[in-house]
Amino acid sequence: MKVLVVGGGGREHTLVWKIAQSPRVEQIYCAPGNIGIKNLANCVNLSVDDIKGLADFAETNSIDLTIVGPEAPLVAGIVDEFEKRGLGIFGPSKAAAQIEGSKVFSKELMKKYKIPTAAYRVFDRFEDAITYINTAVVPLVVKAEGLAAGKGVIIVKDRDTAKAAVKDIMIDKAFGASGARIVIEEYLEGPEVTVLAFCDGKIAVPMVSSRDHKPIFDGNKGPNTGGMGAVSPASAYSSELAEVVEKNIIQRTIDAMASEGIPFKGILYTGLMLTKTGPKVLEYNCRFGDPETQVVIPRLKTDLIDIIEAVINDNLIHTKIEWKDETAVCVVMASGGYPGPYEIDKPINGFDEAEKKEAVVFHAGTAAKNDKIVTAGGRVLGITALGKDIQDARQKAYEAVSKINFDGMHYRKDIGLL
Ligand code: AMP
Ligand code: GLY
């Protein structure tokens, strides 16, 4: 079988790494891929937004299955285009991808089907949002409705900052058209957990839990990033909680989408806050998480291609999915200055030494220059290790991290400790 993976970050490197282990796969392509992925797949110079180009490529090269990493092409309708041409693809339709593409859609869905989430209001007029804030209880969370590359959520501690955030989004259009409507919601507190689930439109099969570490500095200090590391399982997520979440949140969401006539097929990412009054949904994504994938997929024993085929054929119910009973830790190594401005083109040393350790090095922002691997993005690498417990996994991951160096590198020392 020939497989095309769309994307070029740490998440896609992990997917390619897993797919390369499938005896059923002869050839992997990745668009655009990265230097690490190049060792396992043919990288194709097409951007993730070039839906027509990707479909033409899949047609010309007789690709049997395309797997999409990032949200933008899913929300733009890549699955509909491939299906129209009779090409095999894994992911939600454009209509189903609204669950991530429109926060108003997802909040209304949760309200209608009684899925626990933060209380909220929707505004499409600046003046109405300001009037509401004048009497609202703070802290509050202000969210642009549409996609904003992970930056569209602003937590505000007082009313003036809330008004400034609304002005930024609605008047100064910090996120363009994505901010034409906003959601203002109740601030929730508690440990955060991510649960990814395979969904075939009818049933959801949750994967093992994970936890992202979004802030740049140790102790969850500093600005939010795309994710500085992850751990699986999430320690706060007990089997009792898992049962409640699976029934009252994840399966209920899949049932709700089916009732709305837009069955959800693909990966449903549920971001949860474990509050004192029970688990509540922070957000849905219509895809694998990054960096959560770097800790979840290495624990998967079953062939990923078998599961994906079962999703496409509406046959998830008959598919056995097995996981390693181990703990996984992923430490992200970032460029100095990230998530603010940073320099690139810094040579990276120590790959051979790091790969000799019991860890896998996933590439995110890397490039080749003069026969050297250099930095090419904010998040550069993700180092994942499995261990018998959190201490063991952390020790293995950080030992590999210590072998790698590049000018200005920054990583958190406390991944898995929170
Ligand atoms: P998102 O960009 O939707 O992934 O949200 C980014 C982060 O904002 C989440 O991971 C949470 O840490 C935080 N967040 C979102 N909604 C809320 C909320 N209602 N209360 C507290 N924190 C939130
Ligand atoms: N780790 C957050 C995300 O993938 O959106």
Image (cartoon, rainbow, N blue to C red):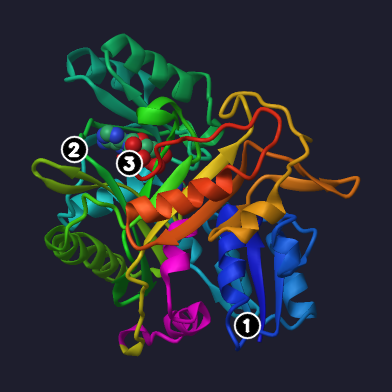
User: Which residue is painted at 55% across and 51% down in the image?
Assistant: 383
Q: Circle 2 sits on which residue?
A: 119
- Residue topped by disc 1: 86
Q: Amino acid at mark 1?
A: Gly
Single out the residue that lies furthest toward the top: 160
In this view of the protein, can residue 92 be seen by the observer? no
Kindly indicate the quadrant of the structure image that contains residue 1. bottom right
Look at the image and say whether residue 291 sits in the magenta stretch: no
Q: Position of residue 100 (x, y in %)?
A: 42, 51
Disc 3 residue type (three-letter):
Leu
Q: State which quadrant residue 249 falls in.
A: bottom left
The percent coordinates of residue 32 (x first, y second) are 73, 58
Our reading of the magenta stretch's main secondary structure is helix
N-terminal of the pair, mark 3 or mark 2, is 2
- Would residue 382 be seen by someone viewing this image from the given angle? yes
- Dot 2, crowdedness within 10 Å: few (<14), some or many (≥20)? few
Q: In the displayed structure, does residue 417 sit left or right of residue 144?
A: left
Q: Which residue is mark 3?
A: 417
- Marks 3 and 1 sit apart, C-alpha to C-alpha, by 47 Å
Amino acid type of the residue tagged 2 in the rendering = Ala
